[in-house]
Amino acid sequence: MISGGEQAHGSSVMDQVGDNIIHHVSNSDIHHPIVHLPHLFGIDMSVTKHVMMLWVVAVLVSVVVIIPIRRFLRKGSGVPTGMINAIESIVKFIRDSIVKPNVGSKWVMMWTPLLLTFFFFILFANAIGMIPIFDVLGLSDRFLFHTNPESFLNRLLHGGVTATGNFNVTAGLATITFFSIMVAGTLAHGFINHWKNLAPKGLAWPVYIILIPIELMGLLVKPFALTMRLAANMTGGHIALLALLSLMAIFGEMFHSTAAGVGVAFISVPMAAAISGLEIIVVLVQAYVFTLLTSVFIGMAINVDH
Amino acid sequence: MANDPDHFLGKSLHQFQRFVRQSGAAAGAAYTLMGAILFLGALGFFLDQYFQSSPLWLLLGLGLGIMVGFYELAKTVFKK
């Protein structure tokens, strides 16, 4: 819990615990990135932990989903087996139960690839956050390797691993959703008609003075809701877990007794295990909800009925 | 098994798919309501900090957020 070498000596556990939790769920400090890179157009291009996790997720999605599908298609065998069977079930579920009812039969094959990409990417990014890779590394560094604070391994230990818990990542995904809504509406109705469709037809002109700004704000609010929802849900679960586990250190210090800390562990560890179980469901549900909402918003741009 | 409509697993899966189809629009409206209040409220908060006019812009933002959110909700509820 309490990562070594960074706390101010002499301060209480209560003072440190909040900072440690935030430190754990947040990205690498910009002054301690994993790989230092120069600025480009005024932007620091250094690789932080969340950036690295995004690359890891991209590789994982390729290895687990894209490559097996390519191999299956190349083989030309009609009957899927093993991993392909599982992937096929997910693809069919998303296409038939999420995309088709929302965007309609005409556009289903156009938007399914994007929504499947969202689903698999978010699912893997969420799931990898549940695996305590860097905590294990931190533990081994503390007791075995004792690396230099500036070493690559030590830099890996700053910040959390759930890339989808970073608001910039979810904002990036929501930006794709925003432009997809625009493209879907434009392809279905033409550029001018798409914008005309924003507000209902046949109303008195003074109503449009209020309605058009409300509709324009509604356009921006949808991707914002997607951004906040995913990042907040993924961060919230990890904070709850860490807060429960921190109780051991807090009680130990409060009663100046190791026994008190160990006693609380009998309650806090099973509760943390239960929340971890819940988090496994959250991992799946969040990927599903993002896909569902994107498909609903794209569908609203295609099937306009005020 | 899951493809057999009479098997309990098949029935459950079809029922689940039906719920998914029906829940999409409601989930979208609910999240848009929450997002509108948060987004415009936050915008108002930052404008207040910039213009030193607290709580004028925050209240305006929250009011506008409620308006936009409920408008989007009404669009879903009163869909033709």
Image (spheres, coloured by chain):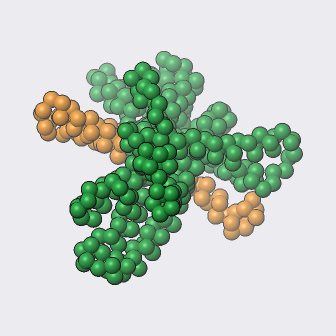
Chain colours: A green, B orange
B41 lies left or right of B49 = right
Q: Quadrant of the C terminus of chain A?
A: top left
Residue nearer the viewer, A3 or A235:
A3
* Residue positioned 34% across, 26% down in the render: A212
* Residue positioned 68% across, 66% down in the render: B9
* Residue A176 sits above or below residue A88 on the image: above
A97 lies left or right of A32 = right
- Residue at the outermost top position: A192
* Residue positioned 21% across, 32% down in the render: B47
Q: Quadrant of the N terminus of chain A?
A: bottom left
A289 lies left or right of A21 = right
Residue B57 placement: quadrant: top left
Residue nearer the viewer, A208 or A63:
A63
Q: Residue A146 at x, y = what percent?
A: 46, 56
* Residue positioned 15% across, 29% down in the render: B51
Q: How many numbered marks, from 0 up?
A: 0
Residue A57 placement: quadrant: top right
Q: Residue A119 at x, y = what percent?
A: 58, 45
B11 lies left or right of B29 = right
- Residue at the outermost left position: B53
Residue nearer the viewer, A236 or A9:
A9
Q: Residue A148 at x, y = what percent?
A: 44, 49
* Residue A237 sits above or below residue A255 on the image: above
